Image (cartoon, helix red, strand yellow):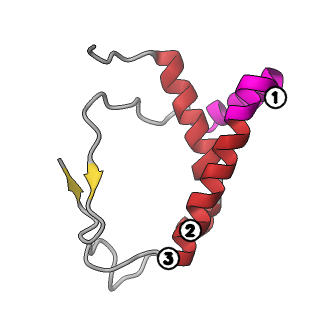
Amino acid sequence: MKMTLDLDLAQEAKALVALAFRNGPIEDLHAGVPCAVCSGRADVSHISDEEMKAVMKSAVNALYRLLWQRDYDPAPYNENLALGRRSTTHWDAPELRKPMRWASKTKRPTP
């Protein structure tokens, strides 16, 4: 089946990313000043294992909470989505292409 763009689903996806990922520990990492020496270098790690673990744990916890609300308590879920949508109005729409796998060593996408 060919994937098509569903604008409501796209808005929901962006809101979930804002709520579960963007508004989590990644924001603290992003808030700093870029490294003048290593910025843009794919061969240099820009996040520690501990920081990555904290980011992913926060995202999983937030997504679980949101998905639980969606299935068992939809009123707060819809309120949270409205909050997330307010911060994503200028984000790009999803790209409808095959997802890229990220190579763990190179940190570059592979087809």
Label located before the other in sequence (1 or 3)? 3
What range of the chain is rendered magenta?
67-88
- The answer to whether residue 56 of the structure is visible from this angle is yes
Please name the residue that numbered disc 2 is placed on. 53
Give the residue pinned by disc 1: 76
Where residue 67 appears, as percent x and y from the top left, is 67, 33
Going by the numbered disc 1, the residue's amino acid type is Pro
Which residue is tagged 3?
A: 49
Labelled pair 3, 2 in contact (Cβ < 8 Å) = yes
Q: CA distance from mark 1 to mark 3?
A: 33 Å
14 on left or right of 42? right
Q: Is residue 57 above or below residue 20?
A: below
- What residue do we see at 56% from left, 76% from top? 50
Helix, strand or loop status at disc 2:
helix
Q: Which quadrant of the figure contains the N terminus?
A: top left
**Which amino acid, by three-letter code, is at mark 2?**
Lys
Residue 80 belongs to magenta span:
yes
